[in-house]
Amino acid sequence: MKKTPLALLVAAMTTLVACNDSATTQKAEPTTAPQKVVTTLLPEFNDRLDIYHQVTLNTDLSHLSDNQKAMLGKLIDVAEIMDDLFWKQSFGEDKSSFLAKIDNEKVRQFAEINYGPWDRLDADKPFLSGYSEKALGAQFYPQDITKQQLQQAEQSIDATGLYSVIRRDKSGNLVSIPYSIMYKKELKAASKLLLEAAALADDKEFANYLTMRSQAFLSDNYQASDFAWMDMKNNPIDVVIGPIETYEDQLVGYRSAFEAYVLVKDQAWSERLAKFASFLPALQKGLPVDNKFKQETPGTDADLNAYDVIYYAGHSNAGGKTIAINLPNDEQVQLEKGTRRLQLKNAMQAKFDHILAPIATVLIAPEQQKHVTFDAFFANTMFHEVAHGLGIKNTINDKGTVRQALKEHASALEEGKADILGLYMIAELFKQGQISEGTIEDNYVTFMAGIFRSVRFGAASAHGKANMMRFNYFQQEGAFERDAQGLYRVNINKMTQAMTSLSQLILTIQGTGDYAKVDQLIKEQGLIKPQLAADLAKLEAAAIPVDIDFKQGKEVLGL
């Protein structure tokens, strides 16, 4: 029955009185407030809270226009959205509610660095009370799903998709939900901000990339914007943003995680690197493996540049920090255009100064410590990224792409390939006289010290497994020696031999898509053995940080 105005007034008055009565009652008879839920640090992690050294992310912005500075602010705003999305993909629990349960400030900061209650540099072990092991599939899949169930449903769902999550419907059937729908609100906001940033861009190609990336957020079609990103050459500002790497999906390695890097180009260092991209086709032909494994031709439109990074977000900011980027991951884009390699020079310098150089004084033999240099560290890191573009992307026996054939082990083996082929390329370029700074001994010994730095990240991640495979293989082949004092010396000749044979092994496994072989290799070699664990403990005793964390944002930059 339709209410009259008088009836509406009476109803409103009645409601108001009821509210007042309720308030009065609450004052007279206060109810007991619910107890705050608190989670605490597990005792065995008491010594883990200081493993990160904080670094301020800053750079000189004086050469940028007002529009470019305003654009940086917009890009950081989009990066913050990527950060929130990664929390959802990785952890699932509401970030604010989760952090509010932690009373201790240092523990709360450690949880923020790890994006949840699992220690990313200690095999994802839970460090807070009330939490069990992290699901291998993070929040990309139902928590109870198995690989077999996922494989059985491949014909009916987007089982191998990069840009969707898997859920169960009311009937318990598996269904796929595209990111653009699952995270519709956040991605619409991010898309709008990217368009606003594009309007401020002085460089037309950069504006085009931002526009296409904003469209990709709404369509889940990222390939076109990847091609557009490859066409950028002159922009002094860059941004890597979106669902990119698949390392967070440790169940099958298919789903991509949201992340962002906001970057300012270091023009002087970039000019030093430009010449190396042209060597890729020749280096591909010279790889130490049968011809059938090197028939693919890397794109020649690739480039190398150095940047200062001013903001990390999402996957790139979780736990250990990336210091170099090689993208896009799309195999078709790589074959047609190559990849872009971005060296994050200020973050790299921070890791060298605060971590790598101190490690060398503890674990490298005194007479070889002089060979641990920043230039060698920079080159090793750079050619690691270059090496991602070499080798093979598609199996030679119709098993599909290497990523599809090797499933959850694909990322670990790819990182292992990049590590070892990067060093191989440096050795070849020294032979050709294309590298004249320093000596190959610098690169070999710095590489050895770099293994100690990297294995401290643990063996759970793709990079961690790659580090351990390399260390154990080198030890097996005599590439280094350890004396009675626990100091390591590189054997230059045997290092060269081990580098060549490991390159052959990895490229062959990738080319044949031999899942059983890589599974065996990781189980046997992807482990931190007791002697190495004891040596790494010396670094903890010396209070050498494991990795860096950032003080960052618009306020830091004066934006």
Image: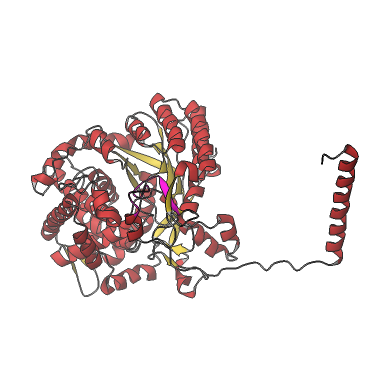
Task: Name the image quarter holding the N terminus.
Answer: top right
Residue found at x 14% / y 43%: 294
**From this viewpoint, is residue 376 visible?**
no
Q: Residue lying furthest front in this view? A: 1
Q: Quadrant of residue 477?
A: bottom left
- Judge by depth and name the residue closer to the eye, 547 or 113: 113
Residue 254 lies in magenta, yes or no? no
Numbered range of the magenta stretch: 153-167
Q: Is residue 407 above or below residue 468?
A: above
- Judge by depth and name the residue closer to the eye, 274 or 315: 315
- Judge by depth and name the residue closer to the eye, 331 or 229: 331
Residue found at x 36% / y 44%: 344
Q: Position of residue 263 (x, y in %)?
A: 42, 39
The colour style of the image is secondary structure
Q: Quadrant of residue 280?
A: top left
Q: Position of residue 532 (x, y in %)?
A: 27, 70
Q: Is residue 321 above or below residue 58?
A: below
Magenta stretch, overall SS: loop
Q: Position of residue 102 (x, y in %)?
A: 58, 64
**From this viewpoint, is residue 342 visible?**
yes
Residue 165 lies in magenta, yes or no? yes
